[in-house]
């Protein structure tokens, strides 16, 4: 079973529908015990970093997610869910994240482009369970903040919108996308299927 974490924010139903279209058994839940019992865990998100982290911590869902990640269970973050997996964010202040990946989320640099970054862009991918080897898919983004750092250790895909930024991360059983695979057509569905079928080869 795939557990989609419900902390009162995010595009939960669209993610659920995408997995259901693939034939997966999926549940939206705010119950840490059900998250613990699931085979896969998804942290989606749309909204403000500070509010999202506060809700996760108030409900104990942050600990449920961290336990799932440390156990070797496949975990996927989407959009804000990816940003919360980093150590910090500078969105409207300076706030602590879950710390699954090093680094700080920052606002896009002012390069004369419209912010938020909204629309379709092509990825440059590296080896990761989410992607087919050699595939550089076109995916759908909606975000004003990003991880500007690229790392040989955990960057699984990069993209360019005025500046190069990290579009996906992967370390062991924990992976995440800044874009929305559930809104990215056939390419996004392939990624979600690959996550669903992923059995894990190591802990983050």
Image (spheres, helix red, strand yellow):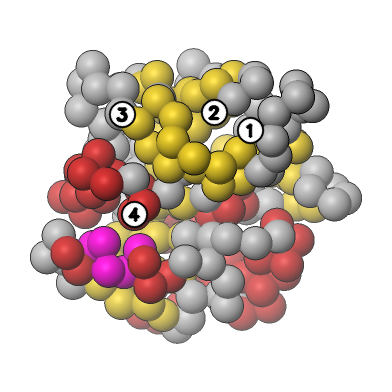
Q: CA distance from mark 4 to mark 1?
A: 21 Å
Determine whether label 3 and label 4 are within 8 Å by CB: no
Task: Categorize mark 3 by other alpha carbons within 10 Å: few (<14), some (14-19), many (20+).
Answer: some
Name the image quarter holding residue 196.
Answer: bottom left
Instruction: Decide which of 106, 171 is in the foreground and name it.
Output: 106
Task: Categorize mark 2 by other alpha carbons within 10 Å: few (<14), some (14-19), many (20+).
Answer: many
| Circle 3 or circle 1, nearest the eye | 3
Residue 24 visible within the image: yes
Residue visible at 56% across and 42% down? Answer: 118
Range covered by the magenta-colored residues: 15-19
Predominant secondary structure in magenta?
helix
Determine whether label 2 and label 1 are within 8 Å by CB: yes
Residue visible at 46% across and 51% down? Answer: 77
Q: Return the disc, 3 or 1, that comes first in the chain's sequence.
A: 3
In the image, 157: left or right of 22? Answer: right
Can you identify the residue that label 2 sits on? 166
Helix, strand or loop for disc 1:
loop
Q: Return the disc, 2 or 4, that comes first in the chain's sequence.
A: 2
Q: CA distance from mark 3 to mark 1?
A: 19 Å
Helix, strand or loop for disc 4:
helix
Label annotation for residue 137:
3
Magenta stretch encompasses residue 16? yes
Q: Return the disc, 2 or 1, that comes first in the chain's sequence.
A: 1
x and y percentages locating residue 60 in the rendered image: 59, 75
Can you identify the residue that label 1 sits on? 147
């Amino acid at each position: 079973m795939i557990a989609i974490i419900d902390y009162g924010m995010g595009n939960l139903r669209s993610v659920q529908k995408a997995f259901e279209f693939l034939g997966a058994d999926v549940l939206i839940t705010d119950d840490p015990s059900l998250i613990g019992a699931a085979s896969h865990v998804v942290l989606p998100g749309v909204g403000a970093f500070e509010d999202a982290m506060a809700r996760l911590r108030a409900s104990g869902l942050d600990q449920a997610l961290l336990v799932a990640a440390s156990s070797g269970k496949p975990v996927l973050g989407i959009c804000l869910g990816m940003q919360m997996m980093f150590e910090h964010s500078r969105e409207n202040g300076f706030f602590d994240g879950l710390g699954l990946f090093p680094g700080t989320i920052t606002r896009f640099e002012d390069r004369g482009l419209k912010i938020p970054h909204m629309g379709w862009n092509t990825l440059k991918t590296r080896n990761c369970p989410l992607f087919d080897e050699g595939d550089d898919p076109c995916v759908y983004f909606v975000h004003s903040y990003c991880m500007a750092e690229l790392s040989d250790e955990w960057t699984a895909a990069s993209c360019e919108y005025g500046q190069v930024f990290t579009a996906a991360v992967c370390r062991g059983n924990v992976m995440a996308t800044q874009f929305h695979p559930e809104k990215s057509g056939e390419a996004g569905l392939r990624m979600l299927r690959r996550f669903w079928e992923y059995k894990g080869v190591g802990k983050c």
